[in-house]
Amino acid sequence: MADAQFYGVMTYKLVSRCYVSKRISAVRLCFNSFCLLLMSVYMPYEGEEFRTDDYAEQLAIIDILIEANTDCHVVIAGDFNVDLSRQRIHTAMLQSFCNDVGVSPVALHQSAKFDYSYHFGMSRFNLIDHFLSSDTLFSKAVNCAYVVHDVDNTSDHEPIFCNSTWMLNSLGLLIAS
């Protein structure tokens, strides 16, 4: 357990962190009035049947983490290896998962400005890196989300960003900013 840290006007305490698979890590932060579950993912790409089984297994692990932290707002970020504009099995699995657990892809937010986050030799472009946020954060806290292409980057993935503002009422509940 880490000591409470001061950042801006919010104090938080790192409550727990876990590495539940080679593809998922999670951190639970508790502020004075609410908790946040942050997850980083690297999901399997679509291909052979075993990859679909692995994708389902990783989604189940994320679901277990969310269920174990029902008092938390949730942000999941990383390489989901799913382009939401394509009709593929992993896309359908991720969309179903989002509906079932109450998270939304930030790429669908009205403020989002994404074209692609991955390129294959600058010849094929897809948006496969995502932020998913709990529906409350999605509707009340997301200010903007975007990708940056003009950086010195040796990866075939471009950095994505999500800017959020969290306003709390006297009960510690998230309100519209």
Image (spheres, rainbow, N blue to C red):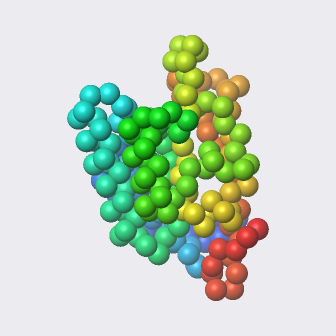
Vertical placement of residue 15 versus 77, above or below = below
Which residue shows up at 36% across the image and 60% down it?
63
User: Which of the two residues, 167 or 151, is positioned nearer the viewer here?
Assistant: 167
Q: In the shown orientation, is residue 108 left or right of residue 101? A: right
Q: Nearer the viewer, residue 138 or 15?
A: 138
Q: Position of residue 47 (x, y in %)?
A: 32, 27
Q: Is residue 11 above or below residue 157?
A: below
Left or right relative to 90: residue 128: right
Q: Residue furthest front?
A: 87
Task: Estimate the x, y position of residue 88 in percent, counting from the top left.
Answer: 42, 34
Taking depth in this image into account, of 4 and 131 the one nearest to the observer is 131
Q: Is residue 88 above or below residue 93?
A: above
- Residue at horizontal 65%, vertical 70%? 10
Residue 52: x %, y % from top left: 29, 38
Does any portion of residue 13 appear in the rendered image? no
**Residue that appears at 69% across and 45% down:** 112
Q: Position of residue 149 (x, y in %)?
A: 67, 27
Residue 90 lies in quadrant: top left
